[in-house]
Amino acid sequence: SSFYTLVLRNASQVLTMAGGPTDKPLTGAALSQWRIIEQGFVACHGDALAAVAPMSELDETRIGPHTTVLDVSGCVLMPGLVECHTHLVFGGNRADEFQRKLQGESYLDILASGGGILSTVRKTRAATFEELLANALHHLEGFRRYGVTTLEAKTGYGLDLETELRLLRVAHEAARQQPIRLVHTFLGAHVPGPEYKGRAAEYLEYLVGEVLPAARGLAEFVDIFCEEGAFSVEDSRRYLQQARDLGFKLKIHAEQLHELGGCQMAAGLGATSVDHCDYLSPEGAAQVAAAGQGRTVAVLLPLVPLYLRQEKYAPGRAFIDAGLPVALSTDFNPGSCPSKNLWLAVSVACLKMGLTPLEALAAVTLNAAWALDRQQQIGSLEPGKRADVLVLNVPDYRELPYWLGENPVRQVVIGGQIS
Ligand code: NIG
Ligand code: FE
């Protein structure tokens, strides 16, 4: 039928994220020059967007007896949030380390003492498939309430063949049981497994030889934590090259706590994203932009320095001015960011990284889609794209980063269905 299935009408603003270049993620002036429609509507046909336009252009003949019509007066409409970096599946929590951190212990000191990531590895290995699944579904429910419609889920708390595969299978089962679309990343190279303490290169050989072949078909991306106490730039380079040869797309955790050059190395290998970047300098950012040919996205995680009591935040303003595309994410995980509030990340990116509200909103939608290689399907409100739409309880986008820590979401549409 040519009737619309769902129409959201009378929105005070429709944030389309559309109208800019489509061959590359947005940066520079383009990151804030996308189109806002005042007094607009969004119409869906099945799971796809059919029309996004001013109310004056709404074709009433396409509203039939079975069309669901919602009046969203006084609301902003925007694309569903794309949460492009999470460590979704893990056992237990690290509330005990919160106390140690408040007493002054650093993230890397806690890790070196066998805590941190390794403490979550012990709890994750001890957890059953069902326990991990229940936790993941609980967190996905929370993300959905915040308006997340696509979410990247990393492994990285198993660090052996059996547990890493269990984490991938848990994520796939969680994807099946609820509406948020998942993107799967293998982060077996989070830190060397406890059995390989002090033998980082041998651990990576084990992953390449035994685990990556088994992870094919279950994960689209391979990621590595390039940092002191984790993996060196050279070990990371070799590993990412081998992963690429096996057909995986690439990501890296780099320049989180030191400027080692991991971002530039990974961008040179064609990484889809380089994540954290708090210690990446503006000059380094220009080199990453060049090495990645304008396609590699820097995923900034503003809640992480906040939670690690760190003064240094990625200089996002300078990155954008240097032509490096940026996206924003929470980095949801039990150690450095136990928060699912991507709206808070948007506010902190404005306050501490110098992004404007318009830039930050494009960074959690279209550029986050680019960071997952999903830019053809999601991230903007354009006919043909998937009908992932948020109805927000504010009349003007400027209120979104303003109401610090609030959840503005009234309704979430995923694939044309009100969820
Ligand atoms: O992205 N930096 C490395 N990995 C995670 C934290 C993982 C953890 O502490 O459990 C991150 O911040
Ligand atoms: Fe992370």
Image: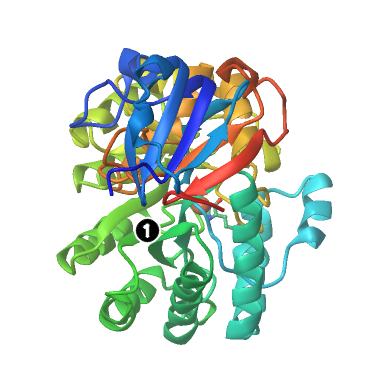
Q: How is the image coloured?
A: rainbow
What element does badge 1 sit on? Answer: strand
In the depicted structure, whether residue 138 falls above or below residue 277? below
Q: Which residue sits at x=72%, y=24%?
A: 403
Q: Position of residue 274 (x, y in %)?
A: 36, 43
Q: Nearer the viewer, residue 381 or 22?
A: 381
Q: Within 8 Å of ligand 2, the CB of disc 1?
A: no
Q: Is residue 277 visible?
A: no
Q: Which residue is mark 1?
A: 223
The image quadrant of residue 168 is bottom left
Residue 347 in picture, x, y percent from top left = 62, 26
Q: How many marks?
A: 1
Left or right of 151 in this view: 322: left
Residue 226 shown left or right of residue 289 in the figure? right
Q: Position of residue 145 (x, y in %)?
A: 64, 48
Q: Is 268 left or right of 212, judged from the image as shown? A: left
> Which of the pair 65/169 is nearer the observer?
65
Q: Position of residue 283 (x, y in %)?
A: 33, 22
Compared to 287, does 320 lie above or below? above
Q: Give whichever of 302, 400 is nearer the camera.
A: 400
Residue 303 appears in the picture as rendered: yes
Q: Residues within 10 Å of mark 1 (few under 14, many from 20)?
A: many
The residue sitting at the left extreme is 245
Q: Amino acid at mark 1?
A: Asp
Instruction: Using residue 325 as the reference point, say whether residue 280 is left or right of it.
Output: right
